[in-house]
Image (cartoon, coloured by chain):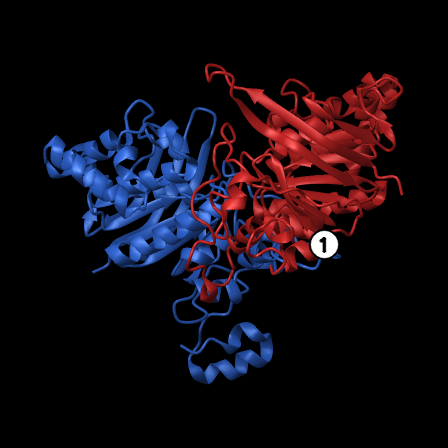
């Protein structure tokens, strides 16, 4: 059964000055044991999407539409009590800044224990034992001592491990991760990524991992969904997305990410900057920066096209997968995009 | 050729209140040269002292000890070059593009401010500001009158670069100039920095935690760990034949960008130690896979490396007389 299903999710932030269209019709599914990376730059709506899944956005100013189902349950219709059972129980979240996500006045053991007691109803002693077990699971050295440590007494990497331990405390089936390694040093980031990958596999969790970093996605993702201006513009298996992107934005992002380009040439940067989400323009949001822009792009929002099995790209320039008989005809017309589209 | 900048044995310790006289040893005996027209990259993890070092180079922080020589003139002593004269020739771009601009000033005034306080007439300074905004790719008519909060991150960083160049410096210290930017904008700013360097014949010190960026932009790299230099050398040498185990670990920690070649084992474990109480001997010994007794007791020295092509590491394995079992073989 599908673990998470999101259909046509829309999130707007309404204030007196303006309405920000942060997420504009996002749909995806996550199967048990699958790692979905939502990849995007700041303002693309990736974190808002993630928070909407657990309804962590301020209810007063946020308008959420669409459908979110986790393990069959309709999250957007949940009452506060059911929502509290969901958060930390069925689904848990880890954040970018462990220092601000952990409570500075409680020890690590107390914080993990609190979550365990809330969800399992066990006593203090059992909760402490479980907390110790969890610190061992996330490979924190000398865990007995660390149980009684306050967050500020831990290094950045250990704090992030403690937060992962807390998220795992009640055996969630879905783990949501919002840039959990971005604030970490390079040598620590890779340790945490390997840990998350191992835990996800051993515990069979589904995971939604938000990041802006293609390198991080290549280390952890099974599938990737690329977001731009509140929409998923491309999705598919990670290896295919990174080696043969279909959407011009994904291709631009790959080309502009510095990784061993020749030093004597400019990097192929994407010109311009992302759109202002207070004023949603007509047509494709990427059109003003797009090298493959056509007349249609400024007028019509591109619908999802499926160039190959498991691949989706919302772009007018992408050729839809066609019956085998038509592939040869198209491939002579428009080159490499069509040749792979045997469905 | 006379190097643009020589730093000799720079040291900066910050006392920690209530710790019984302990201090953060942010920069602890760092020496290096920056050649004219080159880009020196400085890499390291948080707490390694790279930002403190940047501030020392401009005397934004006064070093506790050590010496700076700018184009042959000692800095800040009699018969040398005064600090304000140094700052005419060396400018800085900071990581946080918003907090480094005055929020109550239109950005054209921020750019004009430097030339103005250095004695240019108001009109002249404004003229320079307009020219510099054009050079960094911003239309002065459109963006000049705006306040920082009306610009995107990339645009703000362009303004910061314009401001740094407005005083006509010969050297620019870039402290994580692209770290806070999105990837697509990062590439634009890197291209701009390269173009400006050619155009104005600049020398860069480029500080970053991102090895890929440093590899792209630098001619030489200096790797720092806990306030000391671990390794220094030309870019190809460092990336193709890293000598120091820490440099190797840093390089191996970079994501592969290929899901078929994921990193399976962490190159090193643990976090960088606290710079308040750095480990004895070699500061890397607590995380080093090749640690031996000599590493815990004796401080490895960086061999003599005055030449622009020399590639050296502060590691006992590269000192044949250190007593380390792998010495000479690694």
Res. B56 image quadrant = top right
Residue drawn where x is 54% and y is 25% of the image? B24
Return the x and y of residue B277 as percentages of the image width and height.
Answer: 49, 29
Horizontal and vertical percent for residue B40?
Answer: 73, 43
How crowded is the residue under tag 1: few (<14 C-alpha within 10 Å), some, or many (20+)? some
What residue is rendered at 81% in x and 24% in y? B75
Q: Which chain is red?
A: B
Residue occupying image coordinates x 81% and y 17%? B117
Quadrant of the drawing holding the N terminus of chain A: bottom left
Q: Which residue is mark 1?
A: A266
Residue at screen point 60% across, 25% down:
B99
Position of the C terminus of chain A by quadrant: bottom left
In the rendered structure, the colour chosen for chain A is blue
| Left or right: B329, with A165 as reference point | right
Q: Position of residue A183 (x, y in %)?
A: 47, 39
Q: How many marks?
A: 1
Q: Is residue B148 left or right of residue A303?
A: right
- In this view, the residue farthest toward the left is A122
In the foreground, B319 or B256: B319
Front residue of A330/B81: it is: B81
Q: Nearer the viewer, residue A48 or A322?
A: A48
């Amino acid at each position: 059964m599908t673990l998470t299903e999101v259909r046509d999710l829309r999130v707007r932030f309404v204030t007196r000055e303006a309405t920000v269209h942060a997420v504009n019709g996002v749909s995806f599914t996550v199967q048990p044991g699958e790692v979905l990376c939502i990849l995007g730059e700041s303002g693309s709506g990736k974190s808002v999407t993630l928070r909407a899944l657990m309804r962590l956005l301020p209810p007063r100013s946020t308008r959420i539409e669409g459908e979110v189902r986790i393990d069959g349950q309709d999250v957007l219709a949940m009452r506060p009590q059911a929502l509290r059972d969901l958060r930390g129980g069925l689904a848990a979240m880890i954040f970018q800044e462990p220092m601000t996500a952990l409570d500075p006045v409680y020890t690590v053991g107390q914080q993990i224990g609190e979550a365990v007691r809330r969800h399992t109803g066990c006593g203090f002693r059992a909760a402490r034992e479980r907390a110790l077990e969890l610190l061992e699971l996330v490979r924190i050295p000398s865990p007995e001592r660390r149980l009684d440590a306050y967050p500020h007494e831990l290094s950045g990497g250990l704090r992030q491990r403690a937060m992962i331990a807390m998220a795992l405390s009640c055996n969630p089936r879905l783990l949501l991760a919002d840039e959990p390694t971005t604030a970490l040093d390079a040598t620590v980031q890779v340790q945490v990524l390997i840990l998350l990958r191992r835990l996800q596999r051993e515990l069979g969790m589904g995971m939604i991992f938000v990041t802006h970093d293609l390198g991080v996605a290549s280390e952890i993702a099974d599938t990737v969904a690329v977001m731009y201006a509140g929409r998923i513009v491309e999705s598919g298996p990670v290896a295919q997305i990174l080696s043969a992107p279909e959407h011009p934005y994904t291709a631009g992002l790959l080309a502009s990410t510095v990784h061993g380009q020749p030093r004597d040439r400019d990097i192929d940067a994407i010109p311009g900057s992302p759109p202002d989400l207070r004023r949603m323009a007509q047509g494709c949001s990427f059109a003003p920066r797009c090298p493959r822009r056509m007349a249609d792009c400024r007028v019509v929002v591109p619908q999802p096209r499926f160039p190959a099995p498991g691949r989706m790209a919302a772009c007018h320039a992408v050729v839809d997968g066609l019956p085998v008989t038509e592939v040869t005809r198209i491939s002579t017309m428009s080159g490499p995009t069509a040749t792979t589209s045997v469905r | 050729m006379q190097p643009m900048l020589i730093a000799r044995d720079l040291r900066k310790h910050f006392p920690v209140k209530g710790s019984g006289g302990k201090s953060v040893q942010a920069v602890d005996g760092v020496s290096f040269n920056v050649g004219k027209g080159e880009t020196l990259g400085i890499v390291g993890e948080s707490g390694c002292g790279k930002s403190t070092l940047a501030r020392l180079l401009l005397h934004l922080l006064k070093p506790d000890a050590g010496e700076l020589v700018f184009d042959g003139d000692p800095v800040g002593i009699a018969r040398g070059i005064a600090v304000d004269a140094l700052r005419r020739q060396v400018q800085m771009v900071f990581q946080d593009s918003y907090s480094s601009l005055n929020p109550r000033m239109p950005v054209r005034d921020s750019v004009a401010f430097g030339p103005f306080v250095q004695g240019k007439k108001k009109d002249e300074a404004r003229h320079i500001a307009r020219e510099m905004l054009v050079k960094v790719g911003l239309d002065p008519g459109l963006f000049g009158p705006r306040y920082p909060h009306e610009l995107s991150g990339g645009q703000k960083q362009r303004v910061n670069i314009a401001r740094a160049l407005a005083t006509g410096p010969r050297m620019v210290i870039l402290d994580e100039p692209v770290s806070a930017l999105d990837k697509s904008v990062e590439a634009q700013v890197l291209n701009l920095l390269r173009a400006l360097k050619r155009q104005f014949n600049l020398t860069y010190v480029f500080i970053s935690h991102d090895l890929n960026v440093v590899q792209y932009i630098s001619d030489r790299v200096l790797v720092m760990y806990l306030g000391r230099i671990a390794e220094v050398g030309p870019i190809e040498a460092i990336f193709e034949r890293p000598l120091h185990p820490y440099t190797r670990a840093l390089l191996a920690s970079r994501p592969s960008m290929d899901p078929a070649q994921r990193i399976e084992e962490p190159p090193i474990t643990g976090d960088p130690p606290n710079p308040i109480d750095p480990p004895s001997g070699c500061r890397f010994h607590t995380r080093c896979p090749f640690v031996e007794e000599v590493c815990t007791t004796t401080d490895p020295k960086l061999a003599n490396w005055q030449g622009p092509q020399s590639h050296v590491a502060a590691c006992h394995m590269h000192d044949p007389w250190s007593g380390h079992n792998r010495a000479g073989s690694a």
